[in-house]
Image (cartoon, coloured by chain):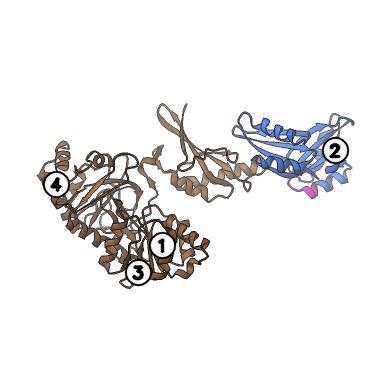
Chain colours: A blue, B brown
Amino acid sequence: MVKQISVFLENKSGRLVRVAQALGEANINIRGLSIADTSDFGILRLIVDQPDKAVAELKNRGVMATVTEVIAMEVPDQPGGLAKVLAYLEAAGINIEYLYSFVEKQSRDAIIMMRVEKIQEALAVLEENNIPILSGERIYSL
Amino acid sequence: MQSENRAGVDLNANSGESLVNVFRYAYANSPFYKNKFAEAGLKLDDIKRPEDIQKLPFTVKSDLRSAYPYGMAAVPMEKIVRIHASSGTTGKPIVAGYTSHDLDQWAKAVAALCEMAGVTKRDVAQVSFGYGLFTGGFGLHYGLEKLGATVVPFSSGNTERQLSLMKDFGTTVLVSTPSFAIYMAETARDLGYDPLSFGLRLGLFGGEPCSEAMREEIEKAWGLKATSNYGLTEVVGPGVSGECGETAGLHILEDLFFPEIIDPLTGKNLPDGEAGELVLTPLFKEGFPVIRYRTGDITRIIPEPCPCGRPQRRMDYITGRSDDMIIIKGVNIFPSQIEEILAGFVEVSPHYLLVLHKQKGFIKDLEIRVELTPEGFSDRFKDLEILEGRIRQRLRSTLSLAPRIKLMEPKSLDRTTGKAKRIVESEE
């Protein structure tokens, strides 16, 4: 399981910069991110090299941040790669809350970060179907 | 009371007659009212029956202010034996002059409220209201004396000495503002005393609103029963209404004060049970009579009889000021109502901002900005949407209006010390 940082952001200019600067000044490296927003607010989801330090740093600066556990898996970087994995989960009745991807530099696989309602069941399904699951340590040090 | 429940005044025979007398007295003796009634085109014969009182114009704060200092007098100044005045923080002070008859009636009123709250002759009552132009100190003082309690006229301030005398004198009743009672308990603890060891058994609180949370805190700290009372310098001072042992609303001394509840917008009388602005007419004042004074306080008359069996109707706790009222789509809303609802959610902080979205001068929509707390934050949109929905739902059931909720980052809303700016307008 991977520790992801979730940050609440008002939809207002300067909010994202503030977060990025805080992390930069604390020498924390961002590995991957995704932003989802409504007209009122956004949620920034971050994968960083030092998640605990990052949350502490953000909280110190009054930023609403929390740690969420997500699953990181490797999916072949080719047409249909993601579809196949999603079909396994769907067949097992596992709902996905959200997912996003980033491409690993050294490999031909894509990395998918995913939050599901039933984490243990999802992990079992992935293992059963030989989908590589990446540990936190692995992801932080990419 | 109850007989007819129309949008009108409930008049029992006694106060009805008194009302007509109050009018006649003012007409004959008060240059201010003579002038005001003439402007309204009212003649002495127009007010014959109690119902006619609704024809009388209201008296508002600015009337009293422009009458500064003695313009409200209805007797020669040689008959006035005491002057009180409001602090005048927002303009000229409001002056009240009392004849000996007025003082006697006022003391009677306060004595009745103290007795209702449970004070007896055997009590030692410490008055921690300021003695001076403010009506609180002297008002409670003479009422308690009239009742026969032993009065300790300490006045405000000097908390340490106040506490040590309280112990030595065996004070059983504390008269103060609720916040001072809380402050005194904290000071007692700082000095190494347990407030529970003081033996206070009853508190008479007034001068500012007392929330349920404050009441609980005071009762727990001192081991006393907290009661609140209500009054204002403009109509006499403390003595208008107060709680009995049931502490479920404040009995109005209806033989001395005539209460009405009006729609603050239209000025029309509202039936019992409906919230609106409290209008008071003291029925006994000779010196500076006041007729249909708009208090600006929002409350309602509780239609049900009190379990204590007293016949005087009760007014509910003050929920806001008419000057704060916002009208949206025909619904009257007070910021205090919203504050109370938000306080029930741990997921948001009590800091809020009301944004009135206007279109052509009318308020089209209400938006409530509220800060998320760590308890409320989830990284799933669904959870945040559910939270917004729950808040909206609670507001709708209380306000009959579903405002838009906008979640904000912590500490993003203005926190001016004191009265925070809670309302902004935005024109579309």
Compared across the picture, whether B94 is left or right of B168 comes to left
**Element at label 4:** loop
Q: How busy is the neighbourhood of tag 1: few (under 14 within 10 Å), some, or many (20 plus)?
A: some
Q: Which mark is residue B47?
A: 4
Q: Which residues are magenta?
A: A116-121
- Which residue is identified by label 3? B124
- Which residue is identified by label 1? B162
Q: Amino acid at mark 3?
A: Val
Q: Is B415 or B352 nearer to us in this picture?
A: B415
Q: Is B391 or B250 nearer to us in this picture?
A: B250
Q: Position of residue A118 (x, y in %)?
A: 75, 48
Query: Mark 1 or 4 closer to N-term?
Result: 4
Q: How busy is the neighbourhood of tag 4: few (under 14 within 10 Å), some, or many (20 plus)?
A: some
**Element at label 1:** helix
**Disc 3, disc 4: CB below 8 Å?**
no
**Disc 3, disc 1: CB below 8 Å?**
no
Q: CA distance from mark 2 to mark 3?
A: 74 Å
Q: Position of residue B306 (x, y in %)?
A: 34, 63
Q: Position of residue B359 (x, y in %)?
A: 43, 28
Q: Amino acid at mark 2?
A: Ser
Compared across the picture, whether B341 is left or right of B1 comes to right
**Disc 2, disc 4: CB below 8 Å?**
no
**Residue B66's quadrant in the figure?**
top left
Q: Amino acid at mark 4?
A: Ile
